[in-house]
Amino acid sequence: MKILITGMAGFIGSHLSKRLTYMGHEVVGIDNINDYYSTKLKEDRLKILLNSNLRNYEVSLEDTNAILSVFEKEKPDIVINLAAQAGVRYSLENPHTYIASNVMGFVNILEGCRHYNVKNLIYASSSSVYGANTTKPFSTSDNIDHPLSLYAATKKSNELMAHTYSHLYNLPTTGLRFFTVYGPWGRPDMALFKFTKAILNDEAIDVYNHGNMMRDFTYVDDIVEAISRLVDKPAQPNSQWTGTNPDPSSSYAPYKVYNIGNNSPVRLMEFIEAIEKKTGKTAKKNFMDLQPGDVPETYADVEDLFINIDFKPSTDIQEGVNRFVDWYLEYYNIKL
């Protein structure tokens, strides 16, 4: 099938593009290669990781005419929308960027899918939508009406917008709530990248909430495996769904939301210890308060995912950290 991936040069998008190409699909991409973080890293993902002649359209999601022209030219069977303005903390200072990319941009993707008869839309949501929820593990059947950041609010809006198009136009939509994805070629603004860089340079790391954080760290290969299994499983209407007791994760329309997490929260200090063990260096820690918009703990219920695709993430944190550090040392030509 022909699959259009937005965010092809991104962390998850580049890994997924490689996997789907290997599986025999025709993959084309949209990525504006913006400077939110190193454009060289994005370009190297395309050049080194993908190592192919995959077409990438360097346009922004919010450019309506450009996006629709890509749909017109490529007429994809499936769309996987991974492009977005990411980051909880960045959204505190740059709110308009999030509305442009994550809301206006997503409307353009939905419109493209609607008008060009896309058979399956898969899109990235986020574990951040759980916001003020404290019941663990987080379930897709939970209410998510209390986001703690604008980033989270835009991701919830994507789920609501997707349902509207599933209802109005019978467009199958599947939302994926990713839980703290990490691994080789990861984003420089994420904890693993920042911590590894600082530890190797004997610089202090900022440890928020005084280390009392837990994250359901999910290795990128597990994310890619789950998405690749969902490519030919478009969302189906739930015949048991009822408006008197509505299940937020499904619908009478072809709409579905999944968590993709490791289902095994890790203490932040344990995460740091895994980096210390791999690098053989001790981190200098700067303990700080919880930042606005952050949640103290994430923990994914992935039962639905396991039932429907017979898979759940399981990569051990030490193994995943080791693979990232090995990549980091090679990419930056560093010798321990």
Image (cartoon, helix red, strand yellow):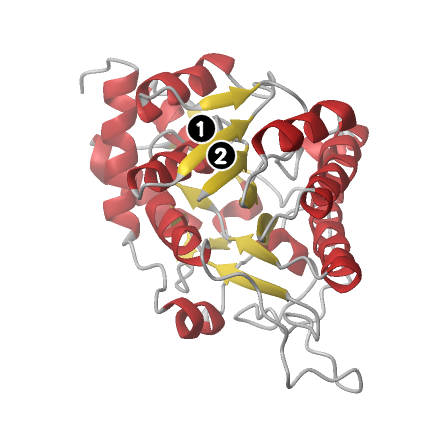
Q: Quadrant of the N terminus?
A: top left
Q: Mark 2, residues whose alpha carbon is within 10 Å: few (<14), some, or many (≥20)? A: few
User: Which residue is depicted at the point 70% across and 69% down?
Assistant: 253
User: Which residue is depicted at the point 27% across and 31% down?
Assistant: 325
* Residue on which the image places disc 1: 194
Label of residue 190 in the image? 2
Image side of residue 147 versus residue 190, left or right: right
Q: Position of residue 264 (x, y in %)?
A: 39, 63
Q: Is residue 89 above or below residue 45?
A: below
Which quadrant of the structure image shows residue 312?
bottom left
Q: Position of residue 290 (x, y in %)?
A: 63, 46
Q: Specify whether residue 61 is in view.
A: no
Q: Position of residue 149 (x, y in %)?
A: 73, 46
User: Which residue is depicted at the point 71% across and 62% down?
Assistant: 170
- The amino acid pointed to by label 2 is Met
Which quadrant of the structure image shows residue 331?
top left
Which quadrant of the structure image shows residue 183?
top left
Q: Are marks 2 and 1 in contact (CB under 8 Å)?
A: yes
- The amino acid pointed to by label 1 is Lys
User: Which residue is depicted at the point 54% across and 45% down?
Assistant: 77
Label of residue 330 in the image? none
Q: Position of residue 19 (x, y in %)?
A: 33, 40
How far is the residue under mark 2 from the one under mark 1? 6 Å
